Amino acid sequence: MKFGTKAIHAGVEPDPSTGAIMTPIYQTSTYVQRSPGDHLGYEYSRTHNPTRTALQNSLAALENGKHGICFSSGLASVDAILKLFSPGDEIISTNDLYGGTYRLFTKVFEKYGLKFHFVPMADTQSVEEKINENTKLIWTETPTNPMMNIVDLKALGEVAKKHQILFGVDNTFASPYIQTPLDLGADIVMHSVTKYLGGHSDVVMGALVVNDDELAQRLAFIQNACGATPGPQDCFLVLRGIKTLHIRMERHCQNGKTIAAYLKNHPKVAKVYWPGFEDHPNHAIAKKQMKDYGGMISFTLVNNQLEDAKKVMEGFKLFSLAESLGGVESLCGHPASMTHASIPKEEREKVGLVDSLIRLSVGIEDAEDLKNDLAEALAQLGSD
Ligand SMILES: *Cc1c(COP(=O)(O)O)cnc(C)c1O
């Protein structure tokens, strides 16, 4: 089955009791048993819920995986992965990681004895240098947030395999429409379902997809034992969102391309970070592993003034200033003070995350209107 057909059909069966074509919201905590242990596969909704099962199967199909496991947020899904490990285990991750994941690693799990190394992951060699007998996981994002660096998933997958280390990829920014890391050697794909998969800025959720049966079982054990599971209503909303994932992504990518090109030629813009540019340092890898380049764009302003960045963001009429991304509506964010505020300034600036950096999540509105919004907001900076 091709992607668009999977988005609409995978994992979803007509409801066995009524024939309802849409998976019902099974708003129930428990299920009646005929006799102790004699049930229909559902006992308690932390463990299993039919609406969640449909969503988990749909997500697995979209990522070309066997097992989907949903959590109450993207970070809860990363938390579940970390609970696979024991004190003394080491994890190698990218140095421009999503701020919330960085915080979870360093502020929560370091004190339980896990050790984290942060390296520039676009350079595969830098990963190999940190590997030792305690290394248990390589963790990356691509494109990275917010610098839009591209990590070579196939090359990293080979490194992980050679050393028998788990390889996990946060695929939130790309979505499975753009890339499917399991096909490139990843063992675990993670999503903040909150973003493109949900797609309508109305749900917070996370998911993992894996192929290995034993790994799936261990993660499902943690899902049930720790209990950070999503409710059925949220699962329904995401199932509904997924039905238009391919159409939405097509437009996000198209608008992303238009807006990136517009910004690149704007006299008030210093630098534009978007993997679709031929002069992006890892464009060749992006071209190889991504079907398209997405709607996430970061840019900096000439003179790099925080005040100018604020003025631009306050001046937008369509790009709403808000955390998050991947919804149908365009958003803008200021990583230095919002998503990445928990990363020390020197660390941030080392990777180019300067004070005037603005991140856009380009929505699926008409591109002309988005361009006009940018034009008007940037015009406030005057000419000097
Ligand atoms: C939002 C986000 C997360 C965290 O997901 P939540 O659903 O907010 O918990 C993790 N990784 C990336 C890349 C994200 O954008």
Image (cartoon, rainbow, N blue to C red):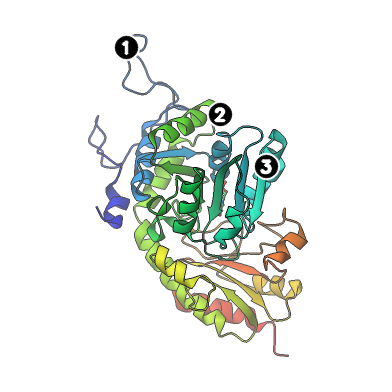
Circle 3: residue type: Lys
- Spatial CA distance of label 1 from label 3 is 49 Å
Which circle, 2 or 1, is nearer the viewer?
A: 2
Tell whether 289 sits left or right of 23. Answer: right
Q: What residue does disc 3 label?
A: 115
Residue 383 visible in the picture: yes
How crowded is the residue under tag 1: few (<14 C-alpha within 10 Å), some, or many (20+)? few
Which badge, 1 or 3, comes first in the chain's sequence?
1
Mark 2 residue type: Cys
Q: Check the image and report above or below for 371 versus 338.
A: below
Asked whether 220 or 88 is in front, the reply is 88
Location of residue 384 by image quarter: bottom right
Disc 2 and disc 1: Cα gap in Å? 28 Å
Q: Amino acid at mark 1?
A: Arg
Residue nearest the viewer, comparing 76 with 352: 352
Q: Residue at x 60, y 81 (%)?
A: 376
Residue 193 visible in the displayed image: no
Residue at screen point 62% across, 87% down: 267
Horizontally, is 119 left or right of 296 in the view? right
Q: Earlier in the sequence, mark 2 or mark 3?
A: 3
What separation in Å lies between label 2 and label 3 (alpha carbons)? Answer: 22 Å
**Residue 205: image location, x then y, percent:** 51, 44
- Residue at 53% from the left image edge and 71% from the top image edge: 274
24 or 193: nearer the viewer: 193
Residue nearest the observer in this picture, 191 or 247: 191
Lower sequence index among marks 2 and 1: 1
| Marks 1, 3: nearer the viewer | 3
Q: What residue would you read off at disc 2? A: 226
Query: How many other residues sit within 10 Å of disc 3, few (<14), some (14-19) or many (≥20)?
Result: some
Rendered location of residue 95, percent (x, y)? 64, 57
Query: What residue did someone put label 1 on?
Result: 34
